[in-house]
Image (tube, rainbow, N blue to C red):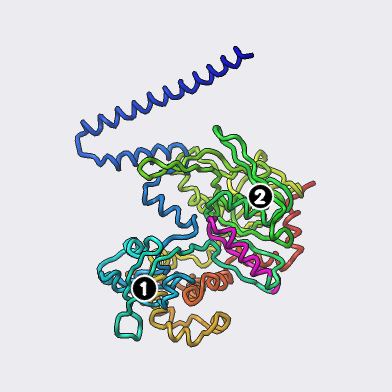
Amino acid sequence: MIRKLTFLAFLAFFAVLTAYTQFSEQSLKFGEVFDKISRFYVDTINEDKFIEEVIIQMLHDLDPHSSYLNKDEVKAMQEPLDGNFEGIGISFNILKDTIFIINPIPGGPSEKLGIKAGDRIIFIDGENVAGIGITSTDVMKKLKGKKGTKVTVSVLRRDIDKLIDFIITRDEIPIYSVDASYMIDDKNGYIKLSRFSSTSLKEFLASLTNLKKQGLRNLILDLNGNGGGYLNVAFELADQFISGRKMLVYTEGMQNPRRNYYSTDAGEFQEGMLVVMIDESSASASEIVAGALQDWDRAVIVGRKSFGKGLVQQPFLLSDGSMIRLTVAKYYTPTGRLIQKPYQEGFDAYSRELAKRNITGELISSDSISFPDSLKYRTLELNRIVYGGGGIMPDYFVPIDTTSNSPYYWNLISRGIFNQFILKYEDSNRNQLSSNYSNFTKYEKDFYVTDYLTQQLISYAEAEGLNFEKNEFEKSRKMINLLIKAYIARDLWSTTEFYKIYNQKNPIFLKAVEILKNPELYTMKLEAYSDN
């Protein structure tokens, strides 16, 4: 027995030594190539940039989600997932080379000192920041800083001739991942989650508790556009809806043995109808939640097929503070469906996959999405048919709304003209808006986008170089008017009020509400594909 163990130990040591030797030889080869380039190449090269580009390309060749981040990118990536940053607590925009405060963050140091929406920042620590071509990145560098440090901000406020100085002590500023939470009627509620950060579960539970106090019995969970985040937060959220010990997701890779993640019996919404909204931008953690709820027949999934990101990245910090995020495993739903869509055709083809869906009609008709029999799976409670092959296919498909789309509309949005106009309009009319609409209920009922207001938008767009296209504008008029009203509401109150208005014309939301208000539709959807 001792001889056998000794022999096995020798084999293990030999295997490790061989792997290390091979790795060392390849590392040496790479070093030799780089040495020759740096010493003999015809032109001067930026060695740091060169190495980074080699690393980026090497990771791209592995799969589309292994990636490299430099030191600044590592810090920027962590903030939205950590759920906070350190600064003065404002949301801002730059209009005509001037920093406009859209809103002070509730409870933050700026709000506590009396800084208001519409204030213009002219000086930061005595340095002029108006009319100098400052960028959003420059502003954040000047205003962010360690908790407890101070910064002096001089603002110009409408109807006040002199600058107002505020000495602000920086503090931790929360980054919220619940964008909206409200009751649709006396028993149906809505929560929108924008990302899966370290604070998402706490935020969700707080919103859920608040809605329950208002009579919540059924819930719409909106994961539209949610690109994911932390894996543990995904299954902790799914756990809130599923009773007992049931598998929520599992991961597996060549060097990572299968790992199962299970629910507990501690969920806060294990009963009541549940509808989950997804679309083509819902990815990763969103797909883990939607897949688990679908596989256990706990929710009706409504919308369009999700993105299809099912690769697990593990971060590895490098010696200079940069990082590689290396794919080490794959996500599978409880029925065994691989969430990841194919990527064998390379990074460029993978990057164009969503555009391809639009061309092939997959965003307009479910009939354009084909699933071979080999991708059929059965749900774990009702034995319904669901499909693998990448992404989560909803139980009820809702086509993308093209009736309001036009090049003029998309130019208004993509060129930032629409957002800048709203900022300008609110700055000029803030006092009147606050006086006329003391609360959101009154605003929602009484505020109308007049022809005069839309003409102001058209004139502003023309001044910004966007020619007016009458037919295109008329096609998009209803959506433009809706967004004007929604964005004004957001800046006067919060993102919850934005979605209260925006969702009035959101086809996926409207279908979700229809299902909740017609319980037989909910039951039918959970049984529709069963062929027992």
Q: Examine the image and state in which quarter residue 526 appears.
A: bottom right
Of callouts 2 and 1, the N-terminal one: 1
Position above or below: 382 against 25 = below
At label 1, the amino acid type is Phe
At label 2, the amino acid type is Ala
Q: Where residue 408 sits in the image (x, y, percent)?
A: 42, 67
Q: Secondary structure at mark 1?
A: strand
Query: Which portion, as a residue range, is magenta?
Result: 186-212
The quadrant of the picture occupied by the N terminus is: top right
> Who is closer to the viewer here, 320 or 506?
320
Say the numbered circle drawn on residue 302.
none
Q: Where residue 422 sits in the image (x, y, percent)?
A: 42, 75
For label 1, the crowd category at 10 Å Cα-Cα, with few meaning under 14, some 14 to 19 and many 20 or more, is many
Q: Where residue 196 sits in the image (x, y, percent)?
A: 54, 55
Which residue is at 31% across, 75% downward? Answer: 154
Q: Examine the image and state in which quarter residue 506 appears.
A: bottom right
66 magenta-colored? no
Which residue is at 57% across, 40% downward? Answer: 330
Are circles 2 and 1 on residues that touch, CB within 8 Å?
no
Distance from label 2 to label 1 (Cα)?
Answer: 43 Å
Say the numbered circle drawn on residue 292.
2
Q: Is residue 21 visible?
A: yes
Identify the residue at the far right of this view: 532
Position above or below: 22 against 293 = above
Which residue is at 64% across, 71% downward? Answer: 183
Say the numbered circle drawn on residue 100.
1
Using residue 345 as the reference point, say whether residue 168 is left or right of it.
left
For label 2, the crowd category at 10 Å Cα-Cα, with few meaning under 14, some 14 to 19 and many 20 or more, is many
